[in-house]
Amino acid sequence: MTTSYNGPADRFTLFSNIIHDKSGKPDRAGQMWAVSEWPVDEIMALANWAANEAEKFKNRKGQVCVKVQQNFYPKQSEAGNSYLLGVTKDHKPKREARPAPGLRLPGSEDRIDALLNEDIPF
């Protein structure tokens, strides 16, 4: 499988299978669950990245955190059951998208620069 992605490599990747609850219990309607088997090497890579490389911030509770990225892909098992494949990896900032020439509004560059330079309180 080839890809055109040319961004930074993932520091870790953890996979999970997320299953719809089929217990039939009314209080679990629409709920999902997961049990994952994560390789210790990938957990160690996550811990190393979080401790040494990731940008840290404080959440609303004042806890020091790192941001991870999670993607969910609909899949179907060999038995015909639908599930979501969850992929957890290090968060990468969005790449700057450059609008096509002529699509900028006059003065928009100044407003964008001002927004990027504002302090964001945590």
Image (cartoon, grey):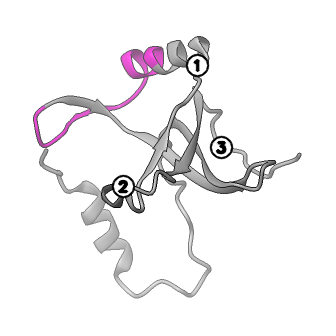
- Residue 43 in the image: above or below residue 61: above
Q: Quadrant of residue 105?
A: bottom left
- Point out the stretch of residues depicted in magenta: 47-62
Between marks 1 and 3, how big is the CA–CA gap? 20 Å
The numbered mark, 1 or 3, whose residue comes first in the sequence reads 3
Residue 53: x percent and y percent?
43, 22
Mark 1 belongs to which amino acid?
Answer: Glu
Rounded to the nearest angstrom, the CA distance separating label 2 from label 1 is 31 Å
Q: Amino acid at mark 2?
A: Arg
Residue 51 sits inside the magenta stretch: yes
Report the residue at 76% width, 56% height from top.
80
The residue at the point 63 percent across, 37 percent down is: 8
Where the C terminus falls, by quadrant? top left
Q: Of the two numbered discs 3 and 2 on the same chain, state the one appearing first in sequence.
A: 3
Left or right position of 114 against 61: right
Q: Which residue is mark 3?
A: 7
Q: Is residue 8 above or below residue 104?
A: above
Residue that label 1 marks: 42
Q: Residue 106 location, x and y as percent?
A: 39, 87
Name the element at disc 3: loop
Residue identifier under label 2: 28
What's the residue type where badge 3 is placed?
Answer: Gly
Q: Quadrant of residue 17?
A: top right
Q: Give whichever of discs 2 and 1 has the lower sequence position.
A: 2
Are dots 1 and 3 in contact, CB under 8 Å?
Answer: no
Of discs 3 and 2, which sits in the foreground? 2
Q: CA distance from mark 3 to mark 2?
A: 40 Å
The answer to which of 104 and 5 lies nearer the viewer is: 5
Residue 24 in magenta stretch: no
Residue at 39%, 61% (x, y): give it. 29
Element under disc 1: helix
